[in-house]
Amino acid sequence: MRNAVPPALRFWLKFKRVQFLAKLRQARREDDVEHDRLPRANTAGKEHGLNVIVFDDRIPTPDRDSGSLRMFSILKSLVKLGQPAFISLSKLRQPEYERMLNEAGVEVVSWTDYRKVLKRRPFQVALFSRPDVAGALLSSIKRTSPGIKTIYDTVDVAFLRLEREYRVVADKHFARLARRYKKLETRLARSCDQVWCVTPEDQFALSQEVPSARFEIIPNIHPLQDRGESFVARRGLVFIGNFLHRPNEDAVHFFMREIYPIVREAVPGVTISIVGSDPTSAITAYGSENVTVTGYVPDVNPIFHSCRVFVAPLRFGAGMKGKIGQALSYGVPVVTTSVGAEGMGLVHGREALIADKAEDFAEALISVYNDAALWQRLSDQGVSHIARHFTPPVVEEKIHQAIQTLCSSDESR
């Protein structure tokens, strides 16, 4: 016989349920009001296209981080197939960026309404970006739309990044996190109809755990940019990264403590700009006459047009490093590590300079900073490499082929 629920507890549970439903109704009303202020995506003539519903943990902010730039570019490419809908699981509203999506032809939907939208519109594909998002929604989406095809977009393989972080910092917390994410990510790869990885290295790590998964490589996306000043008119070094991402903070500490002193001795007065959102107090403490910590910069064009060398001394991470592709798209030579260069097909001395030890990194940086011919060769080869592999038309074709392969897979059985 089950224990009776005490009246006081029963009343409290009922009260909390009423309170939750009231908050949910209020959130929906607020979302409706906010969305009414935004321009609607033009859906005319797209009702019969290949429609994809996309879930991510936030509204893409393409001027702030490479993951957002990639997602924004993916969404724009999906507009050419049909009428995509985008749902962010974050409660943080971003009207300016939502407007950008609407104007690009993407329907932005409140997270509170995703079931209604799935029932109202015939989506053929659901795309989940990042493991936490896919883990939270995959089962619900499959119950709501049993016939829908599912794509797990890894963005980067979290367990690989965390395993590497543990090997560098030796904190067992990251080893535990790595094990948790390996369990989640392998389950998602096994459960979804297709898995998107950004690099072959990420695909290899995940395929070792789930060899039966259907993988596609969908890399970062980088439009070619104006190349700016010539070698002689440029000065200084630059690092760009969002400091909520731990690999970026570690990279700056590694550079400032072990690499910059060697470079400064060989190139007296050399400056560096450390650019990116949410710098920690430990990062801002590096500020000096020759070191500028800017925080978020809305327009990075002047930085890339005038700096001489981009540095990316990353010691751990996974996926493709958007900062490196961005620098190469401007024709700025890059000095990075093997982790930083991962997945891009860069060859040391051809498209970039690659070194892992502090002394070797400093030597490579000093050489390209002082050698105009080397600088120009790396600049030209870097731009050509981006043009061949990572511009929007090139990656858009990969996206369309991956989705069309997914949607035709049943027909070939």
Image (cartoon, rainbow, N blue to C red):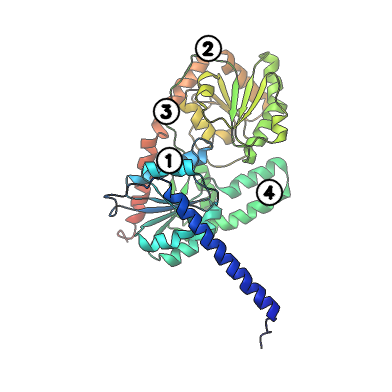
Neighbourhood count class around disc 3 (C-alpha, 10 Å): few under 14, some 14–19, many 20 upward: some
- Residue sitting at x 69%, y 36%: 280
Helix, strand or loop at disc 4? helix
What residue does disc 4 label? 174
Q: Which mark is residue 233?
A: 2
Image quadrant where one finds the C terminus: bottom left
Helix, strand or loop at disc 1? helix
CA distance for labels 1 and 2: 35 Å
Q: Is residue 413 above or below residue 50?
A: below
Apparent side of residue 320 relative to residue 109 in the rendered image (left or right): right
Percent coordinates x, y for residue 79 in the rendering: 35, 45
- Residue type at mark 1 is Met
Neighbourhood count class around disc 1 (C-alpha, 10 Å): few under 14, some 14–19, many 20 upward: some
Front residue (pair 198, 60) = 60
Q: Are marks 1 and 4 in contact (CB under 8 Å)?
A: no
Front residue (pair 95, 182) = 95
- Residue sitting at x 54%, y 51%: 90
